[in-house]
Amino acid sequence: MKFGTSYILALFLLLFLACGNDDDMVTSPVDEDIDLSNIPYDPQPFDLVIPDSFPQMEIPADNPITVAGQDLGRHLFYDPVLSADSSMSCSSCHLQNSSFTDNRAVSIGIDGIGGTRSSMSLLNIGFNYNGLFWDGRSLTLEEQALLPVEDPIELHNLWPDVIDKLQASDLYREKFRKAFGIGLASEITKELAVKALAQFERSIVSSGNSWFDQVIYGNDPTKQFEDDELNGFLMFFDQSNGALPDAECGHCHPAPLFTTDEYINNGLDPASEPVDFLDPGYGTVTQFPSDFGRFRVPTLRNIALTAPYMHDGRFQTLEEVVEHYNSGGHHAPNIDPLITPLELTPEQQQDLIAFLKTLSDMDVVENPLYSNPF
Amino acid sequence: MPLSRKVFKMKKLFLYSIVLFGCTLMSCGDDEVPVGTTSEVTLNFTANYGTNMLDSDTQTTHDFEEESTVRFTEFRFFISDVVFTTEEGTDETALIEIDEIDFSRSNMDAKYIRSVPTGKYSGIKFFIGVEAEFNNTKPEEYASEHPLANTASYWLAWNSYIHCKLEGFLDNGTANEIPFSYHTGSDDLLRSVTIPYNITLAADGSFDLDIMVDVEKILYKNDTYWNIEEFPATHNPSNPDDLNTANYIMDNLSEAFKIQ
């Protein structure tokens, strides 16, 4: 839907522009404006390498990923110029080393105020089709990227101030020109800034080289799981043919992305009514009673790097997470029926964790295309 | 022949362009499309539990065996190769290749088909589940709007789409509700449904067919309710109990439809 709509809109826009009077489109340069047209504009498509086992990424037709656009997005992502006191950037809460989370239970913004939610991994975020954030309140990466800049418990800035700084910067004049072909410094806008951020975010894709990918999707028969990893794998996907208990994980965290992007109550808190949930999650967005206390299923790729866990960072370790699932969670009317006591022995719980660790992808964490350019 | 599958993704953009430019062309020139040969059809699927509306995803409970009650949190299934049949038994008219009926938000899910050839039909026929050719594909082959793109609808352990999901809770008076989760998949579990019904499609008209599925019938057969407590799930394809449950669910589901 999203993709289709934006594509059609873009086409209509083109048709419209082609028919309309072009005079409306010309902005006359203001005195202090800087002409950028002598800087070459030669957009090249970014070579997005997606593992074969993955779905195709749907990229909005009005924001294809280019080499210069991804590069601009990367600079903006790491640049504290986005925050009011120049102390923080997106990367402060989305660290490459931590698979783009911040290893805090809840994130802390420039004023030292903690939010109520844990930062989310941006790995494979371009494949999401079902809303962003834990509660789905944002639909596209372009729309999402507008928010942290002005969020009082994040970067606590104002876009006009950010844009003033970007327009005044030689570095950014050149990068916006190369990414979007603008002719004048005054054409640097927040809309273009978030487009570039979104291009950078879409470029953050699994390498396909995690141990899991090598064993399952690789063609090398010498690559086999260790016994504990194999047991964990079989339980995770209910594939042991009765030899081991089913852990049911794969229903909500299926390969290859290890998420369905659905909104689910996985039994974190007891509740007898929707209003009982401290954080209403998806319910805030839909207002549908049984959506209260539901959160988006997060990916488990690189899960060993992203502790603490859950939307509020309540679990410090994977041991605690597996213990939670093993217990069957807390009852609430909308708890998912798959969340039920699993009866895993301590050893089987360890096996499950050994399997989760096979999802670690150090190439993502080390890829220079995603690293701090400054 | 299914037109989607792998080509779907690649053709997507192209298709949009064609549709769009087609529209533009048609709105400019004189309408050359022959009129009077097709009709619009809407298939209104609704779900009941016995005589009550199925109120899935809420706390509404429905009577079950003796003192116990059930409530449903999810009920969805695929339909594929949906056709109108004719008296002669030949010349079936294709309506839908593949789609999903989802009652997890509402007890109604309507499917609209823009142009169906006019004429007399003797009923509707469809598979419940993902027919074999589509079932050979995987979610990653489809663009995200496609009904088969959802990875939640695919189950690796069977190499199959999940034809039907029925999930909920049984309350039989014990301390905790008992969750159940029936997911069925694999080509063997595909079931065919034929419902005879006289349908006449007039030119340029529209026709609504109301198809009701009774969820109670999925869990009740030969005067006996299904033993949810003993057989609460169907996740393991090689477990004979699970397979037996899955067959029970699909057999019953295929007999639970009627036209209202």
Image (spheres, coloured by chain):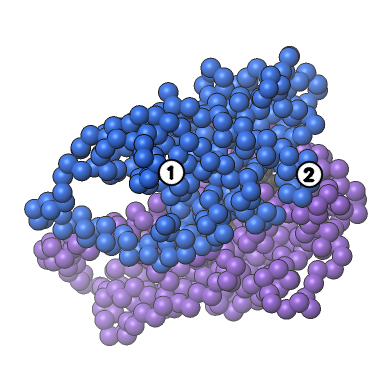
Q: Quadrant of the N terminus of chain B?
A: bottom left
Q: CA distance from mark 1 to mark 2?
A: 31 Å
- Residue A361 at x, y percent in the picture: 69, 70
Label number found at residue B82:
1
Q: Chain of mark 1?
A: B
Q: Is residue B103 above or below residue A172?
A: above
Q: Name the residue tied to disc 2.
A: B240
Q: Is residue A61 above or below residue A5?
A: below
Q: Amino acid at mark 1?
A: Val
Question: Mark 1 or 2 closer to N-term?
Answer: 1
Report the chain shown in purple.
A
Residue located at (81% from left, 54% from top): A240
B235 lies left or right of B174:
left
Q: Quadrant of the C terminus of chain B?
A: top left
- Residue A62 at x, y percent in the picture: 34, 64
- Residue A369 at x, y percent in the picture: 55, 77
Chain B on-screen colour: blue
Q: Chain of mark 2?
A: B
A239 lies left or right of A311:
right
Dot 1: element: strand
Which residue is the extreme one toward the left? Answer: B30
Label number found at residue A29:
none
A259 lies left or right of A228:
left
